Image (tube, rainbow, N blue to C red):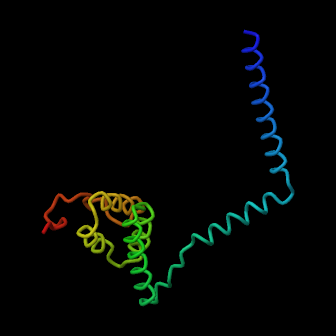
């Protein structure tokens, strides 16, 4: 009984010391004079790394190249089961299209139902598609089975 109590007390003190140690070094890190500067620099680097360069709207060739690059990247990512990233690339390409509904309907025939539903929801969420666009294959224009 006394040994069990001693072990519990020792473990409790160890946990308390560890938490105190963590709090001490966290405060020391936050109070460093260049902490905010380092955080802002790291965030800026991450934004620059993840940023995509959108071409000028007047340059049709650059827009087409960007569109096809985004579509190809989306297809490649979806094949690798990275659906969310693939949908982001599809969305980036579709946003710049003059006729996004036609593009989405052509994608309906080439991607799975699940991915298509997610894409339509995402595009409706950013008001690229009207809310009347169907999210499923209720009509006969779905993928054809051969």
Q: Residue furthest top?
A: 1
Extreme-front residue of the structure:
3
Residue at left 27%, top 62%? Answer: 112
Identify the image quadrant of the N terminus: top right
Please state which of residues 32 and 25 is positioned toward the viewer in this rendering. 25
Foreground residue, 133 or 86?
86
Q: Quadrant of the C terminus?
A: bottom left
Residue 61 x %, y %: 42, 90
Q: In screen coordinates, is 19 left or right of 62?
A: right
Q: Quadrant of residue 25?
A: top right
User: Relative to 107, is 58 above or below?
Assistant: below
Q: Quadrant of residue 72?
A: bottom left
Question: Is residue 27 placed above or below 115 in the rendered structure?
Answer: above
Which residue is pictured at 77% across the width and 20% down the height? 9
Q: Position of residue 111 (x, y in %)?
A: 28, 66
Q: Please provide percent x and percent y for residue 82.
A: 42, 62
Q: Give the number of marks.
A: 0
Which residue is found at the position 76% from the left and 10% from the top?
A: 2
- Left or right: residue 112 versus residue 72 is left
For this view, does 106 lie left or right of residue 52? left
Q: Position of residue 117 (x, y in %)?
A: 31, 58
Q: Camera-side residue: 49 or 13?
A: 13
Residue at 19% in and 66% down: 143
């Amino acid at each position: 009984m006394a040994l069990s109590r001693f072990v519990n007390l020792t473990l409790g003190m160890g946990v308390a010391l560890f938490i105190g140690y963590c709090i001490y070094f966290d405060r020391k890190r936050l109070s460093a004079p260049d902490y905010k500067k380092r955080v802002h620099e790291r965030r800026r680097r991450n934004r620059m790394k993840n940023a995509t360069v959108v071409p000028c709207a007047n340059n049709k060739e650059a827009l087409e190249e960007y569109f096809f690059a985004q579509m190809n990247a989306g297809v490649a990512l979806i094949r690798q089961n990275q659906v969310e990233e693939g949908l982001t690339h599809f969305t980036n390409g579709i946003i710049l299209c003059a006729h996004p509904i036609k593009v989405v309907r052509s994608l309906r025939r080439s991607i799975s139902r699940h991915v298509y539903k997610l894409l339509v929801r995402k595009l409706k969420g950013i008001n690229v598609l009207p809310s009347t666009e169907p999210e499923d294959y209720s009509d006969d224009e779905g993928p054809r089975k051969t």
